[in-house]
Image (cartoon, grey):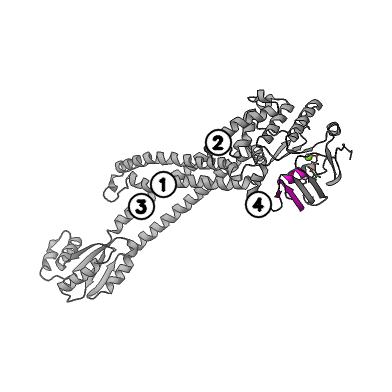
Amino acid sequence: MIDLVDVTKSYGKGLPALNHATLHIEKGEFVFVVGTSGSGKSTLIKLLLKELDATSGNITVSGERLNRMRPRRIPKFRRKIGVVFQDFRLLKDRNVYENVAFAQRVIGRPTRVIKSRVPEVLQEVGLADKYKSFPDELSGGEQQRVALARALVNRPDILLADEPTGNLDPRTSDEIMALLDQVNERGTTVLVVTHNKDIVNAMRKRVVTMRNGVIVSDEQEGAYHEA
Amino acid sequence: MRPSTIWYIIKQGFKNIRRNWMFSVASILNMAACIFLVGVFYVIMANVNHNVRLAEGKIPITVFFEIGTTQEEIDWVGEQIRARPDVQTITFVSADEAWDNFSKTMFPENSAAAEIFRDDNPLVNDSNYQITVNNISLQSSLVKYIEGLDHVREVKQSVRAADFLTDFIRMLNIVSLVIIGILLLLSLFLISNTVSIGISVRKEEISIMKYIGATDRFVRAPFVLEGVLLGAVGAAIPLISLYFVYETAIRYIWEYFNVLSGSVEFLSVERVYRVLLPMGILLGVGVGYLSSSFTSRRHVRV
Ligand SMILES: Nc1ncnc2c1ncn2[C@@H]1O[C@H](COP(=O)(O)OP(=O)(O)OP(=O)(O)O)[C@@H](O)[C@H]1O
Ligand SMILES: [Mg+2]
């Protein structure tokens, strides 16, 4: 599902943010990516979204070779991927329902589909009763659920999460991670970047550890290693 | 695109305008000022051109014949000239008429002088054709043609007047085009500014849209629509107001400068608007489209 072969990304002079990284992730896997600040985790996410181009090496995501992809093709490709971020990135002037519906509007789904799919996905993330609330009226955990619903509403093959619990307290973090696990159990490939040691150690998933742009370890049922 | 998608884009376009309404109003007013000036220039140009055309018809070419040319030969020359498409009118002036005209202008008080020469017309060989042309810029070529005809002794033309009018029109055209061009550039710049402010306000939203997989075209559409709307409204205001201003202006000119009557003729507002209306709308919408299209393309890159 995700394939990196000898991928390097340099932002300019100095050490590359990603240095000859090779990584294979199968369809349906759940993978944690951990590492110190500046080790290249967000860069990896951006490369997978084709927000950045690799300096060298090959990246294949959901069957598409990113190096050769034409700019026109990028939007279609991104529809196969859901993303959530640490800072939620919701539209503050729209309520929960509209924030999720937005993801379908933007890719031209008919209103009929939106009306049935949005409540369904809000149900999945446990926010069915808050669909009229605005982001400012929600807790951090609830806002992240909205963001998750938005990422999932178009049924992506892959869910990428860049520190999804970075702004949340431990209990809420556990809830969000449990949700991500559920999403994974329904067949979506999930890649989670996190600093949350307790969660990584508790969940016993595959753990990829990065340091200075290099993948230094990759363990099935791994644990969080200090850098 | 689905109707619901188009509806969504339209709503977003209007939202953009409302969200930074101060800049929107500024762009609309600037566009309105531009199109108003375009309209004023056009109205003046159209009327000047029209009156110059009228004046052109009044500047004649005079054709004289060789001594001893018979009336039949003169008629033949007349036919040759009449066959030319650029000839508007052709009138024959006999030797006697020529003398009458001349003596009337030379000795308006004294008909005695006219009497003296009554039977010995000094202009006996000056019967001629008075020719007016459709288009003054073609006058020189017509003169060349006539000079080449048999029996023609001399062709006199008011070259200076013709050249002056041609130059005057050309200069007027260039000056107004330059001014209008500058104003349109200003409009282009202002709408582009308004649209880019709208884009920067919605940066966050745009970046989310791109993550979700919105096409560039979808992201840009509301901004392009915004520019087109600003241009269209900016064009509508002056086009409507100019309609009434023009009629009022003509009424005032007749009232206060009635000396002009007879020598000047104004175009009707309908006639002016047959060109000005489509031109104004096209300019407003076109400038709005171009500037918002370019600006959004520049800002909304993947
Ligand atoms: N746009 C950029 N231009 C230049 N350098 C950048 C840019 N983005 C990231 N970097 C550099 O690349 C390296 C990796 O950054 P990245 O954001 O991938 O780290 P990270 O692992 O996500 O860190 P954190 O845990 O703090 O989010 C860092 O040294 C960073 O300074
Ligand atoms: Mg990061």
Residue tagged 3 = B48
Magenta span of residues: A44-68
* Whole-number angstrom distance, CA of label 2 to CA of label 3: 48 Å
- Residue B139 position, x and y percent, is 32, 65
Question: Which of the two discs, 2 and 3, labels the residue nearer the N terminus?
Answer: 2
Mark 3 closeness class: few <14, some 14–19, many ≥20 residues within 10 Å: some
Determine if the C-beta at disc 2 is less than 8 A from ligand 1. no
* Whole-number angstrom distance, CA of label 1 to CA of label 4: 40 Å
Q: Within the image, what quadrant is residue A176 found in? A: top right
Q: Nearer the viewer, residue B231 or A120?
A: A120
Secondary structure of residue under mark 2: helix
* Whole-number angstrom distance, CA of label 3 to CA of label 1: 21 Å
Secondary structure of residue under mark 1: helix
**Is the same chain shared between marks 3 and 1?**
yes
Question: Mark 3, mark 4: which one is toward the viewer?
Answer: 4
Marks 2 and 1 close (CB-CB < 8 Å): no
Q: Is residue B114 above or below residue A211?
A: below
Amino acid tagged 4: Arg
The residue located at (50%, 48%) in the rendering is B184
Question: Mark 2, mark 3: which one is toward the viewer?
Answer: 2
Tag shown at residue B278: 1
Residue tagged 2 = B8
A64 part of magenta stretch: yes
Q: Nearer the viewer, residue B56 or A123?
A: A123
Amino acid tagged 2: Tyr
Amino acid tagged 3: Val
